[in-house]
Amino acid sequence: MSWFEEILARNRKQRERWRDVPGSSVAILMGVAFCLFASVGLLTELKTPLGTHWLAIVTPFLCGAFAAAILWISVRRNLWWVFGAVLTFVMVFFSLAFYLRKHPAVGPPVPAEIQPWLTSTATLVTMLITCSWGLAMWFVGREGQRLFRVQTEMRLAGEIHQALVPAIDHRIGDFEFYGVSLPSGMVGGDLVDVLAHRGRWLAYVVDVAGHGVSAGVLMAMIKSSIHSTLRFEQKLHGLLEEVNRVLCNLKTANMFATCGVVAFSPEGGLRYALAGHLPILRLRGRKVDLLSETNLPLGILAGTEFKAAPCEMKKGDVLVLVTDGLTEVSGQNGEELGLGEISRALSDCDGDPPRKIAEKILRAVSRGSPQRDDQSLLIVRCLSN
């Protein structure tokens, strides 16, 4: 590959990297280029003062405009456009210089004793400004490559998160399920999942402390641990103990997770367990009850036993498991909504399908403060006695 082909290849890679940069950010950088090189245009007037001549305004404007245009072309177009822009720049300024020779501008007189100093100072400042711009672009290029790599990795992590936590909307036997997780960023730490096998099923919600990549990694570990522990036997007994043992061995000291689980088996019926998680809301008619069980979160203390309790459901009853990203939203008075707002929205959902119930709850919460944490909910609806 020749040196020119190598330059073209580098330019192509640069444009590919800049393709993901928002147009607003490119516009800001163009504004920096305009202001910086417009000052160069003003410095050229120290050598030849233009006074009130129209070129006194046009020259700085043209310098800034050409710098901004060359910047935009270099990140959005190929190298040939840059050559064309530079050629146009040279032609325009040669034309202006030729015009000034034919029509000399009459500006304020400059004393002969300081004219050499003004000329040398203007030249030196112009060189310094140009060098500072070159160093700034070098810095942007170096840090930009690192930033683009991080963005690419974050985008990949976001895609993996979407694959790990897909929306849930299906029926298993006499139960309907709907679950959704809304991360606060590209990667979240919440997990909503339903497993079923041979008449058994297990539905659960996990909320890892914090959010972002670290929480997302721990969330993936929890899902893998639960799937490995169950081995297609959707039973609640011993599940949380095994997941807790795995987390205590792998996580960092300041990380933990809360979990809410509902499981069904023909021989054991319906049972639930909470590991430091919010109570489960149960809708019966228009009345909302809270199902609560005191247990430590997962990953706090090795050897912890997690108690499970029976859960009665009749035809039309609904169970709702939520994460604290929904309850910690602030209302108009600045106080957290808590489970109260969700309970009020849920009490108006008698007879609604799970998807519609979820929409009503999310709509009620959205009237509060902007989302700051991952928001997830899982709905289980009984279709028969």
Image (cartoon, rainbow, N blue to C red):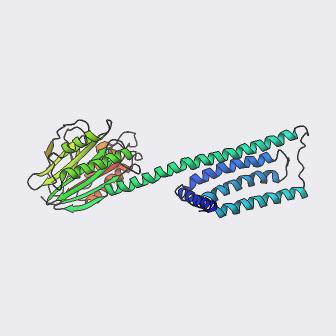
Q: Quadrant of residue 46?
A: top right
Say left or right for 319 vs 146: left
Which quarter shows the N terminus? bottom right
Q: Position of residue 261 (x, y in %)?
A: 21, 48
What residue is shown at x 21% (from left), y 43% (from top)? 274
Is the residue 293 above or below the residue 182 in the image?
A: above
Residue 208 falls in image quadrant: top left
Q: Nearer the viewer, residue 360 or 147?
A: 147
Q: Give above or below for 304 relative to 74.
A: above
- Residue beneath the point at 31% across and 45% down: 218
Q: Position of residue 308 (x, y in %)?
A: 15, 44
x and y, in percent, of residue 4 in the image? 64, 61
Measuring 37% from the left and 39% from the top, which residue is drawn there? Answer: 335
Q: Residue furthest left?
A: 267
* Residue 211 visible in the picture: no
Residue shown at 31% from the left, 42% from the top = 338
**Image quarter (top left, top right, bottom left or bottom right) of the C terminus:** bottom left
Residue 296 appears in the picture as rendered = yes
